[in-house]
Amino acid sequence: MTKLYAEVNGIKICYEERGNGFPVLLVHGFTGKKEDWIGQWIPLSKYFHVIRFDNRNGGCSDRPNIPNTLELLADDIRGLMDFLKIDKAHIIGWSMGGIIVQKFAIKYPERIEKLILINTVMGAPNEQAVEILVKNSLDELEFRNKNKEEAFWTSSRIGYHFKFRKEMEANPNKKFYGLWSVHDLIENQNINPITQQDIINQSNALYPPNSYDDLKKIKLNTLLIASSHDRLTTKNALIELEKIIPNSRLVIIERAGHNSPISRAPEINKIIIEFLQE
């Protein structure tokens, strides 16, 4: 599929579009890229006009050497919607994408029809947590540059439930759900790879977190999706968000890790589609 570019806030944002119907924007997480939505991209496009894009400092988008902020990343979403002449959309954020989307909902609630937050938190609890995340990400990047496949399997211990990981190891060439294979995941991870400076610039947006007072102001119809065995953004974080965001409801995916939108794609897609079609 041809990659397209939007002039947004002085940079080029790389995006792709698929399908017809009401627009749905997919916002990826820390050190990620639009291809991370491999489990949702085709299935959701059968019902909606789906837009996935690379955040600044990632994928095919421009990578200015400027520390990111949640405000800036939220403004990028608004700018992309303006460029595409989309007044209102369903917005889905996963992991750090969920943190960004929270800020977008706080700043631009009139641009959102329904909000979905997947495996996310309010933001980093403190600067030390960001430092640890950056160090781990830099170490993973160094490892990936030496051995892409081994680095994938190492990181998969955190991203996937151990039973599903065993299934992937036993069937590395299998096209899971007809959507992706382990080879696809490894390949996507290494296309337009992240750099050390990108990691540092992106991490700046993780702290300070979104505030309780601001999140309480979100009146949008909101779906929260947590995963029972998520070790990065625990289900307790989503349980807390459900208490804070007034019009929200929580679904917990059992026996799933942080990458449940990939490993449990059919189940999560069904939940998303039913919520958006209500």
Image (cartoon, grey):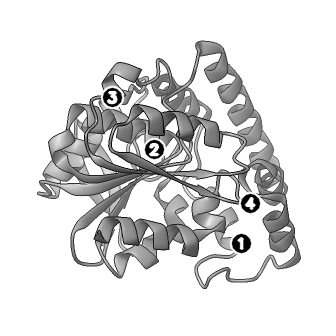
Q: Which mark is residue 183?
A: 1
Residue named by callout 3: 216
Query: Which element is circle 4 on?
Result: loop
Of mark 2 and mark 3, the one earlier in the sequence is: 2
Amino acid type of the residue tagged 3 in the rendering? Lys
The crowding category of the residue bearing disc 4, from other C-alpha atoms within 10 Å (few below 14, some 14 to 19, many at least 20), is some
Answer left or right for 141 relative to 56: right
Q: Is residue 179 left or right of residue 77?
A: right
Q: Nearer the viewer, mark 1 or mark 4?
A: 4
Contact (CB < 8 A) between labels 2 and 3?
A: no
Q: Secondary structure at mark 1?
A: helix
Q: CA distance from mark 2 to mark 4?
A: 22 Å
- Earlier in the chain: of badge 3 and badge 4, it is 3
Q: Looking at the image, which is closer to me, 123 or 61? A: 123
Mark yes or no: residue 232 visible.
yes
Q: Earlier in the sequence, mark 2 or mark 4?
A: 2
Q: Residue at x 59, y 15 (%)?
A: 126
Return the residue at label 2.
97
Residue named by callout 4? 255
Of pointers 2 and 1, the one earlier in the residue sequence: 2
Q: Are marks 3 and 4 in contact (CB under 8 Å)?
A: no
Tell me the quadrant of the picture where the N terminus can be found. Answer: bottom left
Q: For numbered disc 3, what is the local secondary structure? A: loop
The amino acid type found where label 4 is placed reads Arg
Q: CA distance from mark 2 to mark 3?
A: 19 Å
First-in-chain label (1 vs 3): 1
Tell me the residue at 56%/26% (across/down). Answer: 200
Seen in the picture, residue 52 relative to 178 is either above or below; the reply is above
CB under 8 Å between discs 2 and 4: no
- Label 2 is placed on what type of residue? Gly
Give the amino acid at mark 1.
Answer: His
Direction from residue 211 to residue 268 in the image, left or right: right
